[in-house]
Image (cartoon, rainbow, N blue to C red):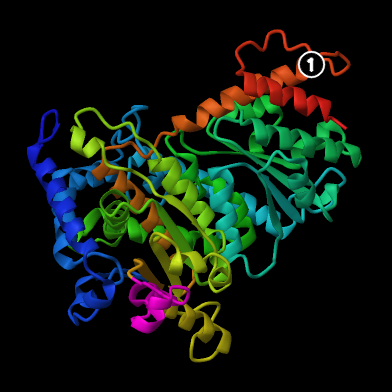
Amino acid sequence: MRGADGPTTDTRLLIDDLYLRARHLKGRHLRDLLTDRTRVNALQVDAGPIHLDLSRQCIDAATLHALFAWASACDLDGARARLAKGEAVNFTEGRAAVHPALRGRFGPAAVRETARFEHQRMAGLVERLRSGERRGFDGSPLKALVCLGIGGSDLGPRLITDALASDGHYPVRFAANADPRELDRALQGLAPQSTAIAIISKTFSTRETLANAAAARAWLRTAGCPPEAEFRHFIGITAQPEAARAWGIHHEHLLRFDQGVGGRYSAWSTVGLGAATACGMPAFDALMDGAAGMDAHFFEQPLAHNLPAWLGLMSVWNRAFMGLGSLAVVPYAERLALLPAWLQQLVMESNGKTARAAGVDATRASLPTAPVVWGACGTTAQHSFFQQLHQGPEPVPVDFIVPCVNSGLTIFNDERQRIVAANALAQASALAVGRPDSAIEASGHEAFPGNRPSSLILLRDLSASTLGALLAAYEHATFTAATVLGINPFDQYGVELGKQMATQIEQVLQRLDAAERPLNLEGAGHLDEATRASIQRLVQNRG
């Protein structure tokens, strides 16, 4: 169903059919759709420890199969095969996306072998840190680790650590923001002589990360660390080892990862050092195994039984065909509190684009792409933004994520876990069905219209392997959405312009003579007038 130059007319016809189906389903209420007893069985799928239920979405089984047909016409099967083999699916940069290779079962053999080697080196470093063998400038064991990164170098490892590090064996902290308060908080209460510091940057040139690294270096020196002993404290994690060595990282304390590993997919590489140190290598290996199992499911299962493909197509259905521009992610587990932020980057940095691949027809190219992703933990979120989910002017799809077992607690042996699970199911039901009381609906203020779509994702437990499967499922869902939309999920050119402009403005701020009146902005002619005025205001209020 693809020609040599891209999709054929059949793809356009399938899109037209999906628009017609969306128009029909917008005229039906979930309250009525859920009276069909066969609906739930037709709209649920399992993959290992994860169960996905789409029965509360504004979709039916026939439309789901129409989405499968469209995905096939967009060559999702071929795209999956190319990703699994390690072919150049990142078509704008001409390289492979090798994060599945980090998990050991798929991708180029050479990348898998290098990843195994670096994984073993990381495991050795984790053991030396956790055992106290690694020592600081005065001979003290390094009893804590501070990880300096940003974006994908921070969000994934931070999420994994928050979700899995329950033993408190080895404290690991993270600092991403260049705001000095972030690093101050990370270092608070730590002794410089017993603190290891990991600098995590793919290029080893990330401005915010290197600024924090310089501040951490000054912190060590103020505590009496001689320059020649700094190497005992610093660990470098990068795809550019030469730049790390030039900064001062000792070769024995340098961990590498492949250039083809995008930041938002990098927690599976040596970038995961912080999480592995906090959780221990057995837990980190179980996380990897869970993700590898989801890789196998995504690459090998047909679309009718493929959970990540369902997730990705559901996202496109709501955004492109139902016209819903937002997705709320609500995990009913405090250990997954950072999942919405991780997903925000994964989805919006991957698919928040309009440019399409060559050969994508105009109909497909005009489809909206990524939703705005946001969210927070239930049940606390119910007391903040759920008011708008229930009675706001437009529906917001929700992903409810509920573990059946959380830290050994279930609905049968813990009252609070029972409260959490009951609230998750109640909210999903209330959003879908509403309150069909005509007298109350007539009053307006107490009306609950319902017909608000949601997906229910049940996790068997919150073990490391289940978390790995969940994260990999969302990764592959994002790839699925990108494939049918005809975009490249593996570049992020939109991040670069702001970085370049920030560098220019920083140089202007550095040059300014604060004593001059008026301020001399000569050489800043490339800045727009609003920015020039803001710079003047910043300097005038320098305090």
Residue nearer the viewer, 218 or 440 = 440
Q: Quadrant of residue 364?
A: top left
Question: In the rendered structure, which segment of residues is drawn in magenta?
Answer: 427-450
Task: Decide if residue 116 is in sight here.
Answer: no
Residue 506 lies left or right of residue 478; in this view the side is right
Q: Where does residue 500 sit, x and y in percent of width and height?
A: 57, 23
Q: Quadrant of the C terminus?
A: top right
Q: Residue at x 55, y 77 (%)?
A: 407
* Magenta span contains residue 431: yes
Residue pointed to by mark 1? 512
* Magenta span contains residue 157: no
Q: Where does residue 530 sit, x and y in percent of width and height?
A: 63, 23
Considering every residue shown, the one lying at the far bottom of the view is 412
Task: Decide if residue 44 is in sight here.
Answer: yes
Q: Quadrant of the N terminus?
A: top left
Type of the residue with mark 1? Leu
| Relative to 58, residue 264 above or below | above
| Relative to 128, residue 457 above or below | below
Residue 270 lies left or right of residue 192; in this view the side is left
